[in-house]
Amino acid sequence: MKKVEAIIKPFKLDDVKEALSTLGVKGLTVSEVKGFGRQRGHREVYRGAEYQVDFVSKIKIEVVMEDELVADAVKVIQEKARTGQIGDGKIFLIPVEDAVRIRTGETGKDAI
Amino acid sequence: MNAGDTTFVLMSAALVMLMTPGLALFYGGMVRGKNVLGTIMQSFIILGVITLEWVLWGYSMSFGPDHGGIIGGLDWFGLRGVGMEPSPNYGTTIPHLAFMVFQCMFAVITPALITGAFAERMKFTAFLLFTLLWATFVYNPLAHWVWGAGGWMAKMGAMDFAGGTVVHISSGFSALAAALVIGKRLGYGSTAYIPHNLPMTITGAALLWFGWFGFNAGSALAANGLAASAFVATHIASSVAALSWLLVEWFHKGKPTTLGAASGAVAGLVAITPASGFVGPVSAVLIGALAGVICYGGVLMKSRLRYDDSLDVVGIHGLGGTWGALATGLFASKAVNDAGSNGLFFGNPGQVGIQLVSVIATMVFAFVMTLIILKVVNAVVGLRVQEEDEERGMDISLHDERGYSF
């Protein structure tokens, strides 16, 4: 079992979510995040005063899946979230020890 | 007594009343989210504080029987003798009470303007005490000098139709004193003070613009041609200044901004205030066009001079008011208002000198008195909130509430 964590451009969220659903992913968690990488921030100007805003808004998707799905999931995320410009984001793979469904107490792959 | 005039002045008073909550939104949107309520409160509650002050002694000090051209007596304390019959001196076709309440709204908004200078860091008790003392010892004498029967500035021939000196120069230079005395916000120079809600600011600017028709046209104190002329001049100057600020910042910084358009509109309204009842439409265009440019420059000046006037009261009201008062001496025309004088461009260069005296007297009086009042308030209750409270924001630390909970 692995957690796939992807930081992507916000406007790519719908495409990525659709593709992951088609692949058989049954649920995912999304958060609005800010950060910086190679993409520079932007300038804001208020009444002539300039501020450099270093943190760029991104979407973080977290989805836990069985090992067999991971390779395909990474492939479709990369395909759907890519624009070719700096700032397309990153994908991280994290091993997951176990999962528990709170309502039923099921564990392991039954819980995801 | 004239029913049309009475209706018009009462409606104008209601319009000017709306400017103070409008200002609350204008300022509220420009601060950080943790200070939105504290900032709105500093304008809104002045409706309470100064209305009370005004009916008890403020109106009497400003417009009551003259003492040496300096101050009105306390004969009208608690509005004694201010009734439904017209006053012989002020708005002679409307009830004295109508004139009183119209003027009350001016007395309310003026100290609210100053709050922009010390936004995000002043104790609420200090703010209340300061407001009360400032209204009593700065606003009331100034209003008497300029508008009171027997006031020395009026006798000298200074022209201020709707409050360029009384309202804008006084609040602008008091704001400068306040910014210097209270000091910079925590983290000034390293923290980005990015406005948290510009749509709120623009809503506020729109309400100010709307209310300003009451402020300027209402100052004719009659439903007549002069009121229409002041209304038109006001609208022209505001529109043109919104445009000129936008253009100059577009040229200077590369992009036109909505905050720039809103700030320009307010700068134009400030500048036309003293001139609105004395100038024609073309003069209003020129006054507005220069107001946008001058106030944009005035706002940039604060980062050069390193004082923290949080919401640019000095740049917009101080400089805009000064430009407006001087412009009145340039563009005034007896063809528009024969109760006034001609300005420089209409053959009377001496008027500029008279306007200049009134400007400098107002600046010095407001600045020095504000310094003294703030020193007193600091000694009695302390001006600034604790560092930790400033960090948490005024909404939680002073008022136990939050503007937004998502």
Image (tube, coloured by chain):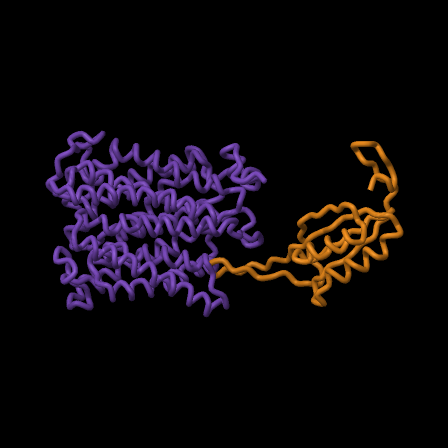
Chain colours: A orange, B purple
User: In the figure, residue B148 lies in which quadrant?
Assistant: top left
Give x and y (percent) for residue B212.
30, 50
In terms of depth relative to the viewer, which is nearer, A12 or B314?
A: A12
Quarter of the image holding residue A6?
A: bottom right
Side of B203 where A57 appears, left or right: right
Q: Is residue B211 above or below residue B304?
A: above
Give the residue drawn at x 22%, y 64%.
B331
Give the position of the C terminus of chain B as an image quadrant: top right
Nearer-the-camera pick, B382 or B230: B230
Counting from the top left corner in percent of width and height, residue B309 is at 44, 51
The answer to whether residue B176 is left or right of residue B105 is right
Q: Is residue A49 visible?
A: yes
The answer, for residue B173, to whether it is visible in the render is no
| In the image, residue A94 above or below residue B132 | below
Whole-percent x and y of residue B201?
Answer: 44, 50
**Number of marks in the rendered image:** 0
**B270 on left or right of A103:** left
Residue furthest bottom in the image: B251
Q: Which residue is drawn at 43% across and 52% down?
A: B202
